[in-house]
Amino acid sequence: DIQMTQSPSSLSASVGDRVTITCRASQGINNYLAWYQQKPGKVPKLLIYAASTLQSGVPSRFGGSGSGTDFTLTISSLQPEDVATYYCQKYNSAPWTFGQGTKVEIK
Amino acid sequence: QVQLQQSGPGLVKPSQTLSLTCAISGDSVSSNSVAWNWIRQSPSRGLEWLGRTFYRSKWYNDYAVSVKSRIIINPDTSKNQFSLQLNSVTPEDTAVYYCTREAPAPNWGYFDYWGQGTLVTVSS
């Protein structure tokens, strides 16, 4: 099975900072990658699919890029409500697998 | 607006069967363009996909290899819901279980709607 590895596992940044999270697939997955946000005690929420397409209603400060094996989630200006754990998920073929998560906190 | 409402017990004894149900509103379990999945989350395993059921002129299932010998996911068209049955549970099956909708074709494989989650603890 294809493994998904995220880095870093956690980060702390100031409000207004640009934040970047990386997700690497052990094999190429074209652009079949989604990103989710999970706030503490809440259900995961879809942010991005097809590596760079923003789900309806998601703020434009979130962006995704990449193809093949290397992908990035960027928050252009970190807000207090962005405190959460972020997960990538590949879906080129079953089984669907997730990264281990990146916890984002405010400094 | 699609809504998924989960139900089922939060405590299961070791070696017994975990059973959860996900009631669908705003869509149909028999839809030809989506799939219905179960995912679990635990500190040790993270987010783990368990399996799915979907209808494409007939019913299909896919299951994760890790649980394939113990899992059944069934649709219930009369109640517009689907269920998870996980047999012979151990404490390692303790997790929050989510039902999810897999996005409509052609965007297979990611999850646009989630149930509220059910914490299932396996303990005697």
Image (cartoon, grey):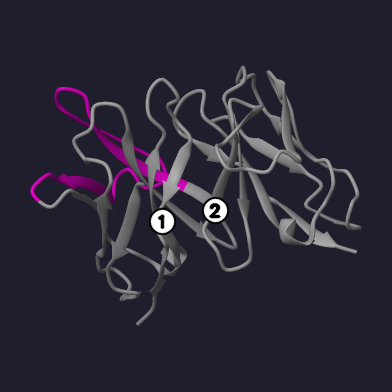
- Identify which amino acid the numbered label 2 is placed on: Pro
Q: How would you classify the magenta stretch by its main secondary structure?
A: strand
Quadrant in which the C terminus of chain A appears: bottom right
Q: How far apart are marks 1 and 2 (CA)?
A: 10 Å
- Report x, y in % for residue A23: 72, 35
Q: Residue at x 47, y 24 (%)?
A: A93
Secondary structure state at the residue bearing disc 1 = strand
Residue at 71% across, 38% down: A60
Q: Is residue B84 something one can see in this rendering?
A: no
Please name the residue that numbered disc 1 is placed on. Answer: B98
In the rendered structure, which segment of residues is drawn in magenta?
B49-78
At label 1, the amino acid type is Tyr
Query: Does residue A7 appear to the left or right of A57 in the view shown?
Result: right
Relative horizontal placement of residue B91, taking residue B23 as reference (left or right): right
Which residue occupies the extreme left position in the image? B78
Q: Quadrant of residue A98?
A: top right
Chain for disc number 2: A
Question: Total marks drawn?
Answer: 2
Which label belongs to residue A44? 2
Q: Can residue B34 be seen in this view?
A: yes
Secondary element at tag 2 = loop
Q: Is residue A74 magenta?
A: no
1 vs 2, front mark: 2
Disc 1: host chain: B
